[in-house]
Amino acid sequence: MSPLRAVVTGTGSYAPSRVMTNDDFAAYLETSDSWIRERTGIRERRIAAEEESTSDLAVFAAQKALESSGLSASDIDGILLATATPDILFPSTACLVQARLGATRAFAFDLNAVCSGFVYAMTVAKSLVETGAASRLLVVGSEVMSRSLDWSDRSTAILFGDGAGAVVVEASTVASRGLGSFRLGADGRHWEMIHVPGGGTRRTEAPHTIRMKGGETFKMAVRQLQESVLEVLALDGLAPADIDLLVPHQANIRIIDALASRLSLPPEKVMVNIDRYGNTSAASIPVALDEAVRGGRVAEGDRILLTAFGAGVTWGSGLLTWEADLQKRSRT
């Protein structure tokens, strides 16, 4: 019997309707549209409505991914939800999504690696599928980062937005391609580089808003992303020139440009949408991937490289190969 391969058979994304522009910040902070765009590449971001939560965004993205794959919620064996902004402390937001979708057969759990969360979740999904533990999974990245911002802090408030993205990962015995090598990393010694001081059991009285050392984060992010990408490519016997599309975490345009330069990748091989969404943490890669697929930037046989760096600090990269008629072939 042929070995099981994990393949992506559907993508979906969702962004709240409210748009917050750089000019909106300039109205009350000492900043400007040009200052923000030059340093981050961001011109606007989406902000969840007061009544919208992480699970709401996740459900919309998941429904689009299911529709794209031709599956219903009842076909799903499990839901892996990457988030650092859960609806409540417990139960998991994934369980709330499972109930809303009606995915009654599915197990469900959250995974928190912050901005690297979606790559971490995809690594787990690949392992579950290729070991036969599950056949059809929903992998979701969903964040409402706006609830963790100090809106008076110019260094962080301008960076983040809200959104959700999802993919369906299925088992196939006939696909020769699909998810390739994935590798993860972490270095907890640098946890203070990006963190939220309060909200847990250590310092319940501390602020529940993001603190970040921007300069240190930039330097470490570029270095670790490059090393991570090269490691994954080497495992599959490939070079940067073999990448058809790089889908990086949308943290900062300077990080993305520096990484692309180190890999000698031209702009047409790099997916960028940070200008419209800002940093949506674990949602940024699946949102960007869905836009690339629906926008016609992904073709038969394309090698797509996912890579992320986030709080923890954490990082990870993974390779997937696209098939134009993946949905039908994955179930043959």
Image (cartoon, rainbow, N blue to C red):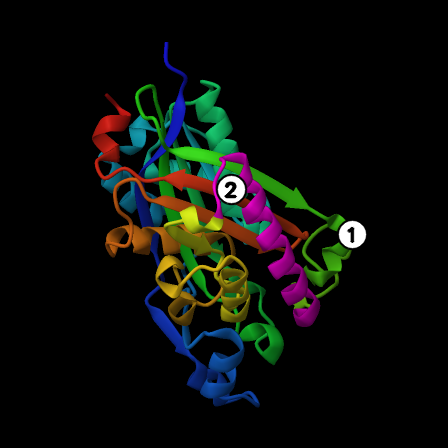
User: Tags 1 and 2 in contact by the CB under 8 Å rule?
Assistant: no
Q: Position of residue 111 (x, y in %)?
A: 56, 41
Residue 263 visible in image:
yes
Indicate the quadrant containing the N terminus: top left, top right, bottom left or bottom right.
top left
Q: Is residue 60 above or below residue 41?
A: above
Instruction: Measure the C-alpha gap from mark 1 to mark 2.
Output: 27 Å
Q: Amino acid at mark 2?
A: Leu
Magenta residue check for 233? yes
For numbered disc 2, what is the local secondary structure? helix
Q: Is residue 6 left or right of residue 188?
A: left
Residue at 24%, 33% in the rendered image: 327
Q: Is residue 269 magenta?
A: no
| Res 71 seen here | no
Q: Is residue 125 above or below residue 21?
A: above
Q: Nearer the viewer, mark 1 or mark 2?
A: 2
The circle on residue 172 is none
Residue located 67% across and 67% down the image: 212
Q: Amino acid at mark 1?
A: Arg
- The residue wearing badge 2 is 233
- Crowd band around label 1 with a 10 angstrom C-alpha radius: few (<14), some (14–19), many (20+): few
Residue named by callout 1: 189
Magenta stretch in the rendered image: 213-239
